[in-house]
Structures are given as C-alpha cells and as structure tokens.
Image (cartoon, helix red, strand yellow):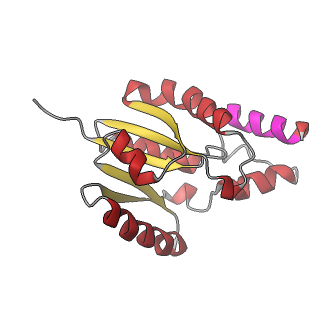
Amino acid sequence: MSVDRIGLYPGTFDPLHNGHYDIMKRAAKLVDRLVIGVAVNVGKNPMFTLEERVEMLREELTPLLGDRVDVRPFENLLMHFAEQVHASVIIRGLRALSDFEFEIQMVGMNSRLNSDIETVFLMASDSSQFISSSLVKEIALLGGDISSFLSPAIADRLKSKIASA
C-alpha cells in the first residue's frame, strides 16, 4: 500500500496573485496531494476575511488544478496544521534574498517542532519575482493597473473591496 505524499503550501493569500499560482502549479507536480493552507495572520491586517480568501482560492484553483488540491483555512501553528493534514513537506516560495533570510529561520524553528516534515523552497519564476500581495493592494488602492498580477476574477474582487471601503 502506497502512502500519498502530501505537500502543504501555506500563506495569507490576500489576495492570491500570479506568483502564488505559479508556485502552486509547480508544487502540485511534486506531491500526490497539495493542501493550500490559508492562514488567519491578523498581524498582516488582511483586506479580505479568511472566509473570502478561502472562497477565492477554491473558485480559482479547483478548475485549474483539479481535485488533487485542497484549500483549507488554519488558525493554529503551521507545524500543528501540517500534522493535521498529514503533510510530509511544506512548500515555500522564494522571491529574493530577503525572503531566504526569513525562511531559513522558520525552517530551523519548524524542524525543532517536527523534524519529520521537510521544507522545500521553489524559486519564483522570472515573471513573478517582484509580485507581492501588499504591492498589488497598494497599486490597486492608488488606482493603478493590476491586471497583469491577478486573475480577472480576483482583480474584480479586489477593485470591489476597495470601492466598498
């Protein structure tokens, strides 16, 4: 009996952008099942609620990546969530050296909490190395064109969220 290799890609995804999607698509090739863990992360002061972010990801990813991908919210410690979903690997995207400095600290702490769960880093593709959710939100808030950073559906939701604020 073979055991499915489950990967976990955690993030705030406020909102999901093309860089996130690139990492998800590539990560899905490395594992049998990919769990997208949508974090509460109140410290980042998200624009969208947890429920809205989960809904957006499910709407976007299910048609594109199929039933091998599961979107789930979580509010607890990442390693506890990884254990709950039976993940053997955590997937993290890296854009720049500054990301690596933060992520290497997280790997050290996470391995102390559970040394059986590995962390794998995927470098952002050339076309998405500069994209971040906070920059996309700032551009949108200032009336800039965000169409090349997000799917049309998420761009519309972000514009509506800004208009109703």
Q: Which residues are magenta?
A: 151-162
* Residue 138 located left or right of residue 49: right
Depicted 40 relative to depicted 62: above or below: below
* Residue 154 located left or right of residue 18: right
Q: How many marks?
A: 0
Q: Quadrant of the C terminus?
A: top right
Residue 160 falls within the magenta-colored stretch? yes
Which quadrant of the figure has residue 119? bottom left
* Residue 19 located left or right of residue 116: right
The residue drawn where x is 42% and y is 25% is 66
Prevailing secondary structure of the magenta residues:
helix
Please provide percent x and percent y for residue 58: 55, 29
Residue 112 falls within the magenta-colored stretch? no
Residue 54 showing in the rendered view: yes
Please provide percent x and percent y for residue 17: 61, 46
Q: Quadrant of the N terminus?
A: top left
Residue 144 showing in the rendered view: no
Which quadrant of the figure has residue 86? top left
The residue drawn where x is 58% and y is 26% is 59
Q: Nearer the viewer, residue 33 or 45?
A: 45
Please provide percent x and percent y for residue 96: 52, 70
* Residue 23 located left or right of residue 30: right
Q: Nearer the viewer, residue 73 or 130?
A: 73
The residue drawn where x is 49% and y is 42% is 37
Which quadrant of the figure has residue 153? top right
